[in-house]
Image (spheres, coloured by chain):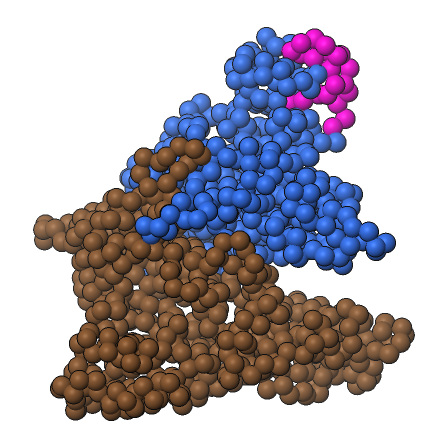
Chain colours: A blue, B brown
Amino acid sequence: MSEETFNIDKNKTFSTWYDTILEKADLVDLRYDVKGFVIYKPWMMIPLREIARLFEVALEEKGHRPVLFPTVIPEKNLRKEKEHVKGFEPEVFWVTHGGKKKLEEKLALRPTSETAIYPMFRYWIQGYSDLPIKIYQNCSVFRFDTKATRALIRAREFHWIEAHDAFATEEEARKQVEEDMEITKKVLYEKLGIPFLFFERPPWDKFKGAVSTFAADALMPDGKVIQLPSTHLLGQNFAKVFNIRYLKKDGSYGYVYQTCYGPAYSRIFAALISIHGDNNGLIFPFEIAPIQVIIVPIFYNKKEFEIVVRKCEMIRDMLVRNGIRAEIDLTEKTPGAKYYFWEMKGVPIRIEIGTKEVEEHSCIVFRRDLRTRDKIDDSQLLASIKMIASDILENLRNRAEKFLQENIREVSDLAALKRVIEEKGGFVKILFCMREECADKIKEVCSAEVRGKILGSKDKVEGNCAVCGKKAREVVYVAKAY
Amino acid sequence: MSEETFNIDKNKTFSTWYDTILEKADLVDLRYDVKGFVIYKPWMMIPLREIARLFEVALEEKGHRPVLFPTVIPEKNLRKEKEHVKGFEPEVFWVTHGGKKKLEEKLALRPTSETAIYPMFRYWIQGYSDLPIKIYQNCSVFRFDTKATRALIRAREFHWIEAHDAFATEEEARKQVEEDMEITKKVLYEKLGIPFLFFERPPWDKFKGAVSTFAADALMPDGKVIQLPSTHLLGQNFAKVFNIRYLKKDGSYGYVYQTCYGPAYSRIFAALISIHGDNNGLIFPFEIAPIQVIIVPIFYNKKEFEIVVRKCEMIRDMLVRNGIRAEIDLTEKTPGAKYYFWEMKGVPIRIEIGTKEVEEHSCIVFRRDLRTRDKIDDSQLLASIKMIASDILENLRNRAEKFLQENIREVSDLAALKRVIEEKGGFVKILFCMREECADKIKEVCSAEVRGKILGSKDKVEGNCAVCGKKAREVVYVAKAY
């Protein structure tokens, strides 16, 4: 590995790029003995938990508090909300035995935790002063997905944060949905540089049991979209089923209004590496990189080695003292092989130090996103690194934003839709009647889905449905999706 | 709740104390619909993740790297190591169905992850340069324990960190066991103030599949001991079963030597609150407390309220800026009710501020462990809090250490052992022949267990077994255990 260069055209052969980088960068191991379950390796674990932490911090800033519910849900609870169970039942893993003993009641491995948590809300919520409740948990969920699995993107066990909130009024619940979107923007766009469009899903594509579903779709390099966090207005549907009522100030009882929000961070990680990587491998935003600065010593004999490594260690120690994950590569590879290796691994900044740099009190600083090198004075190093770190994030975000914007197109009939979806991919705007049979027609003809209407869109709805020709009710976006 | 005082004699009625504080302090909810599974609430979650973080940091400092394996283990892997599966089989939860479909192979919810991880070691380890491997994961594990469950102490799902290491030589593996003990000491004793004794377990009480098992036993207020982290020398047992071999420098192949280490931090949390709490409720060490400093304003009218709260906010902001979890209690309760409430919740430091404190540029600082109050100048506040924080930890540790030492006794025959175990509890030292039938006799007569011999003990083995009178081979400690 160490001597090879990674060179795969990400946009033209994304599938190969993705499968290869997962293995070469040692992010996951796919050889686990159960289909759809993969092993997360250290190079993935560090960014993964940084992403989870970003969501946790953002949620706690907005008043959410951490909890942890059991992994198993009793069958009778899962079955209470009819729509909900219908949606999830085909995908539930069932625990039926403890030791050799058959359990009295089957237990579901949580596919999502509404039916674990809401029976408790009934106990926790008595009067108006108990509201709002805003909680979240960081856990893994399990879905016996019968479609083809794909590591991190469509997995049978994946990792997410799920927030569950209850309010006295519908207005507060709707505000929470907006807050969830703000959190999504703050983490995905601002911190991770992942641009997305926020859709209200059409009624037939809602979360099962919800009044409405809002979801962030990002665009993958192959032109397919990927759903990232979604937030659901549950209204009083679950409250009525689980009898979650509260005593109002006026002495009457009311059902609570609920929302839930689920950033699946293992999937976000998959989108992150796919969107930011390039033909040379991964590119991590600085904040979440497993190693943020890799230092490569350059020397030609033992005497040079000592002088150079001494400086490398000083620089490394200075960076670590300042909270930066910095390491020196002291392996026996050539400098060139080290460069390729760490570029492939996505380390955002590389420092090269040879005897010249020792003499001149400077370093060569390489930034992974632009692949440019600059000489920086030692006295300016820390400040430069901080500046480059924020500049890398901005550049990654801009690049991804440009790609997303260039891949939003508009058509007016089904034939054009099919052509654009097949030839270009991306999002395609159409006028739409909002009937499920027309969505089915699109799926049949284009293998693409109606992702919904953009929230707060100012698109004018004038004309007829691109599919059936009847009067259009919305402007919607269509795309192939993971 | 808010107006009541918590006053339960912890040492005399520990069981009542424990059950009551879990509920009153809102640490867990026991009303989940599946026996042996509980809900972790926010007041528990923050210290819990701080404890996990302490172990993660300590493990990473020693070169362990994070991974995450699937929650499920295929039946055939679990069955490979015969001793191991015999030990765990009665306790395994089995997943048998996905949706309505019967799975081709049953999947175990991991009771521990040796049989998930070691098949992968076979791929990861080829030559000597791949060694050592030192990894850990933070996850939940599942055991269909047929004994009575007890929240956090004996649960069917609990949370732990498990480290799994592989080495070229037995010597390195033995050193790792020592390193695991150092980590245990660093976190439990130094950071959490929990004293313990480290035992080598007798052969019949080893981890199933291990060569030897070493475990930390702490002493609970009722005189029963609780096993905290254990570390296992696995030798080549698993390596032979899973065929984990490496190419040595001399061209021959050898099996690796393995160790594993499992700090169950949900159980450590239970021990922590039990050991440090007092008759007034919880006492958290400062570093892991959910709220580290609670500020209570004292005022008698609206004008005073404004002046006092302004100062409270300034103090709170100053503390938060310095990385301290500080909050102001602005509820409508009386100051006295607030005091009792936060004392019961275990907040280590309380600051009381009234008009007098505003005028005198000072605060009243109350420390929870000693329940003493001192007037501190505002200019000295931050330094004082830091000093008190470290002093609280030292005091809690010393108190617990004294209790542990006072409860180590020595007897020379079975009748005396039975009497001391029943009347005093704690650890009882005896001379012992190291035969399992004598251990069984102790269990039968005293309902107590041979916990093993102390590592590095200088006790002289002179005399006869306290049970059978035959020649003694070791000095061992006996105790009732959770």
From the image, give the main secondary structure of the stretch colored magenta.
loop
Task: Give the residue displayed 63% in from the left and 15% down from the top.
Answer: A438
Q: Residue at x 24, y 91 (%)?
A: B412
Which quadrant of the figure has residue B425? bottom left
Counting from the top left corner in percent of width and height, residue B119 is at: 26, 47
Q: Is residue A108 above or below residue B325?
A: above
Q: Is residue A467 magenta?
A: yes
Residue A16 location, x and y as percent?
Answer: 38, 28
- Res A265 seen here: no
Q: Is residue B285 left or right of residue A411?
A: left
**Looking at the image, which is closer to me, A271 or A123?**
A123
Relative to A361, B7 lies left or right: right
Q: Report the magenta residues as a range.
A: A457-477
Q: Of A429 and A201, which appears nearest the observer?
A: A201
- Please say whether residue A474 is one of the residues in the magenta stretch: yes
- Specify whether A363 is left or right of B117: right
Can residue A85 be seen at all in this image of the molecule?
A: yes
Q: Residue at x 47, y 86 (%)?
A: B398
Q: Indicate the quadrant where residue A346 lies.
A: top left
Up the image or down, B130 lies above or below A170; here it is: below
